[in-house]
Amino acid sequence: MRAITVRDRDAGVGGLTLTDMPHPHAAENDVIVRVHAAGFTPGELDWPATWTDRSGRDRTPSIPGHELSGTVVELGYGTTGLTVGQRVFGLTDWARNGTLAEYTAVEARNLAPLAADIDHTVAAALPISGLTAWQGLFDHGHLTTGQTVLVHGAAGGVGSIAVQLAREVGAHVIGTGRADHREVALDLGAHAFLDLDADDLRDAGEVDVVLDVIGGDVLERSTGLVRPGGTVVTIAAPPTVRPRDGRAIFFVVEPDRARLADLAQRVRAGRLRPVVGAVLPLSEAASAFAGRRRTPGRTIIQVADESGSRHP
């Protein structure tokens, strides 16, 4: 099968190559999925799990990408809850070969059924962004109706979904980002928008929750805006400061089949709109990792069309 692989940690993005790899093996409780569309996180090449397995052993050549939408083609021993031919989407294990490939092995519990009326490219944009937004806002931030939330990167993958979820729950939403992302954020439901390059973050006023995907100076400046009892939630790096009389939380997204199913239902009902910025073939995945495109939303790699035929 064709796959994007990495072998040399020092080579970075330049080490990504499109190669032939063996067909994956379905271990106990696994399924093999024919990948139609895949998502990735640009920083994956810095993650230890991209290079070693859970025992610390080298696992190169490894296949990056951890989000997928596709069709089940094989069931491992003991696998229940899914069937061959079923459309699914979900999140793969960090320390196993990923989704920038024509086929991948996934634990069945990390996949949710996908309705026929949701396009694979839309579904592939949901798992990490959707689960991160939900877990950050509600499981860790405890955001509730009437509170104010500051969402950094409001037109990006996580931020765009967070804006919509926070708005639906009845929160006051302030988004941030680059100036050319203002209209996207406001269209998604943000009540206000701050340009991180030109505006003063203090113009946001006091907030109850900060959802951060940037880290560094932006995270530190945001901490001072949090009301007593409020929370800063970040996925960028463990915070070095915390709000006065508040909490500062760093977390890594966790798979959640039931929440994935809920997010998909929101998409079907028109209550949630994942922002897909670009759809590229597998052959262009390396350039996508390099971040040469600066479009709002997620860049998705289309591996196969709806019929399962290889995408050029």
Image: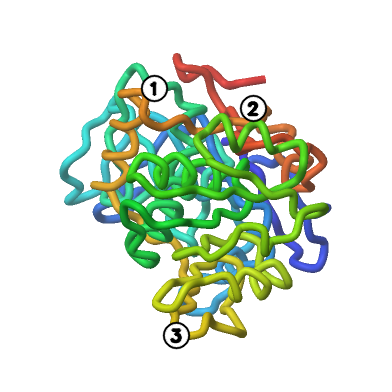
What residue do we see at 52% from left, 33% from top?
Answer: 188
Q: What is the number of the mark on residue 279?
A: 2
Secondary structure under the numbered disc 3 in the rendered image: loop
Q: What is the number of the mark on residue 234?
A: none
* For residue 169, above or below residue 187: below
1 or 3: mark nearer the eye: 3
Quickly name the residue at label 3: 245
Marks 2 and 1, Cα distance to the nearest angstrom?
A: 15 Å
User: Mark 2: which amino acid?
Assistant: Val
How many other residues sit within 10 Å of disc 1, few (<14), some (14-19) or many (≥20)?
some
Q: In terms of sequence position, does the residue under pointer 2 or pointer 1 come before the other?
A: 1
How many other residues sit within 10 Å of disc 2, few (<14), some (14-19) or many (≥20)?
some
Q: Are marks 1 and 3 in contact (CB under 8 Å)?
A: no
Q: Nearer the viewer, residue 134 or 228?
A: 228
Q: What is the number of the mark on residue 118?
A: 1
Q: Nearer the viewer, residue 288 or 35?
A: 288
Relative placement, left or right, of 252 versus 21 is: left
Q: Quadrant of the N terminus?
A: top right
* For residue 302, above or below residue 41: above
Q: Quadrant of the C terminus?
A: top right
Marks 2 and 3, Cα distance to the nearest angstrom?
A: 44 Å
Relative placement, left or right, of 185 versus 142 is: right
Q: Quadrant of residue 239?
A: bottom right
What residue do we see at 39% from left, 65% from top?
Answer: 141
Where residue 37 appears, as percent x and y from the top left, is 52, 31
Residue 127 visible in image: yes
